[in-house]
Each structure stands twice: as structure tokens, then as C-alpha cells.
Image (cartoon, helix red, strand yellow):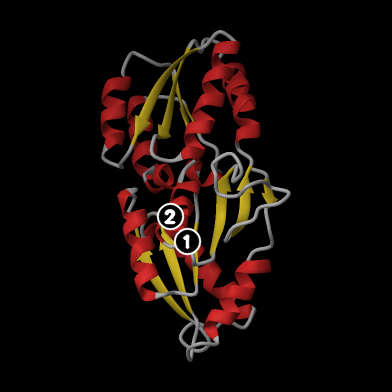
């Protein structure tokens, strides 16, 4: 996975606003919007808190962090964003285009830093990569550039591949862009594509129920919702003996 910086993390306008807001009360407050659960994201939370400490932002000493978890439910993004707006947090940290767009709509006055998001310009997070504007900053996930290559590699590994299932979160713009690219790449080399669009973790079981005898392999579009359900996807794929392509190595460990 290759990443490109949109703006420096905790830099520019976000940092300036963060510091200014923090001066109004004894300690600045950061809202952490987790797309899955603490159990799933513990290692990343630990790394985040550790790096913040190295930068002088020590939890409960120089900064307060309010954690909220969507538990893989996309409707929670807007609910959590609205809650953070009521709490008047100084900065919101999250990941993925869906959560960022929810924050921008529910709390447009609060700066937001995203750890990763698919093509921020195409998904409407920023105006452009050259001139982002707005109140959001973070890193761009360039998985779209690799989508076609993954399809080609799948054909090389599975010479008999003629039917590819593509799984994506239909409620998030990033994976839907990737789904389109994968479908085009598959059709281009003579592979029929079947689309499986989910909106919740519980939809994963239904995908594999309808998957039987319809596809030779499965391509999973990267997304916080899908990542939250990766254990379920992996176990289902193994049980069904379905070759599966992921965009992140964490999913295949």
C-alpha cells in the first residue's frame, strides 16, 4: 500500500485551530472516532497515544481524549460526530472517507485529522490534493492505483479465474470507487464480475451464502467497515475454500 500526504498530520490549520481552542480551557479535548472496536484497534490506539506523548501531548495531563467506537456500524459515524460537536472537542481524529464526511457534515467547525482515506479529492473530503482547503487533513490511500494490478495478479495465480466477486461497503465513497475500478479491470481481461455491496457487518454472512457456485475468487475493497469484519471474512472464505484478495496485509496474517 502506498500513501501520499495531503497535509502534515496535526499540521497547518488543524494544529493552529487545535492550539487556539485549547487555550480557552484548562486542557484541550480530542475526539477519537474509532470505526470498529477497541479490541480490534488496540495496537493502533497504543501507537497513537505513544506518539502523541512523544510530541508532548500526554493523555490526562496535557490533553483529554474522548474515545467513541462505531463497532462497524456506519450509522454511528454521524451520531458520534454530533456528540463530539455537543462536547465541543477541539479536534477529531478518525480514519476512512465515510467517518470524515460524517464529521464534516455534523461538525463542520471542528478540525478533523484522518489517518487514511481513499482519494480525498474524489470522495469530496478536500477540494484538491494541491489545494485541500476546508478543515480536514490526513493521508491519502492510493489503493485505487493498484486495483487493476491485483486483478491481473489474481489471474496469474488462478489461471482458470473467470468469475470474480467484489465485496465493498456501499455506504462509503472510497470503496465504491475501488469497486468500479476492479470491475472495469476484471471485464477488460475477460473476467465476469459479481458485485456484493454491504452496509453492515451482518451482511457478510449473506454474501457468502449467495457466493456459492457464483464466483471463483473474491476481491475485498479496503474500508474501515470491511476491516472491522475481516476476521469474519477470512474465516468464511477459508471455510468456503474461496481464494480472497485483500488490499491490506493485516487481513492475511
Q: Do callouts 2 and 1 mark residues in contact (Cβ within 8 Å)? A: yes
Which residue is under mark 1?
Answer: 108
Residue 105's mark?
A: 2
Q: Position of residue 83 (x, y in %)?
A: 33, 67
Q: Position of residue 158 (x, y in %)?
A: 54, 17
At mark 2, the secondary structure is helix
Residue located at (60% from left, 68% from top): 14
Inspect this view and state whether residue 221 appears.
no
Q: Is residue 8 left or right of residue 155?
A: right
Inspect this view and state whether residue 172 appears.
yes
Q: Position of residue 223 (x, y in %)?
A: 47, 43
Classify 10 Å Cα crowding around label 2: few (below 14), some (14-19), many (20 and above).
Answer: few
Classify 10 Å Cα crowding around label 1: few (below 14), some (14-19), many (20 and above).
Answer: some
Q: Pick the residue in front: 191 or 10.
A: 10
Up the image or down, 75 lies above or below 31; here it is above
Residue located at (55% from left, 16% from top): 186
Q: Pick the residue in front: 93 or 48.
A: 93
At mark 1, the secondary structure is loop
Q: Position of residue 245 (x, y in %)?
A: 51, 30
Query: How far, Cα to Cα, is label 2 from label 1?
Result: 6 Å
Residue 239's mark?
A: none
Q: Quadrant of the N terminus?
A: top right
Up the image or down, 90 lies above or below 116; here it is below
Residue located at (49% from left, 75% from top): 90
Amino acid at each position: 500500500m502506498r500513501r501520499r500526504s495531503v497535509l502534515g498530520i496535526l499540521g497547518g490549520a488543524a494544529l493552529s485551530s487545535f492550539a487556539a481552542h485549547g487555550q480557552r480551557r484548562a486542557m484541550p479535548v480530542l475526539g477519537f472516532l474509532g470505526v470498529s472496536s477497541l479490541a480490534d484497534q488496540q495496537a493502533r490506539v497504543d501507537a497513537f497515544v505513544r506518539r502523541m506523548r512523544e510530541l508532548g501531548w500526554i493523555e490526562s495531563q496535557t490533553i483529554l481524549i474522548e474515545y467513541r467506537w462505531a463497532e462497524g456500524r456506519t450509522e454511528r459515524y454521524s451520531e458520534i460526530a454530533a456528540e463530539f460537536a455537543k462536547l465541543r472537542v477541539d479536534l477529531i481524529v478518525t480514519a476512512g472517507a465515510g467517518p470524515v464526511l460524517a464529521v464534516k457534515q455534523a461538525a463542520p467547525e471542528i478540525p478533523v485529522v484522518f489517518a487514511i482515506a481513499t482519494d480525498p479529492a474524489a470522495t469530496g473530503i478536500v477540494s484538491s490534493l494541491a489545494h485541500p482547503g476546508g478543515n480536514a487533513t490526513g493521508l491519502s490511500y492510493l489503493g485505487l492505483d493498484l486495483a487493476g494490478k491485483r486483478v491481473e495478479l489474481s489471474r496469474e495465480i488462478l489461471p482458470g479465474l473467470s468469475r470474480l466477486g467484489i465485496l465493498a461497503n456501499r455506504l462509503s465513497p472510497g470503496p465504491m470507487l475501488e469497486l468500479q475500478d476492479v470491475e472495469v479491470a476484471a471485464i477488460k481481461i475477460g473476467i465476469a464480475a459479481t458485485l456484493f455491496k454491504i452496509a453492515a457487518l451482518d451482511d457478510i454472512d449473506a454474501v457468502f451464502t449467495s457466493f456459492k457456485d457464483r464466483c471463483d475468487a473474491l476481491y475485498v475493497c479496503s474500508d474501515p467497515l470491511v476491516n472491522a469484519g475481516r476476521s469474519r471474512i477470512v474465516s468464511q472464505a477459508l471455510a468456503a475454500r474461496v481464494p480472497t484478495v485483500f488490499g491490506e496485509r493485516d487481513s492475511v496474517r
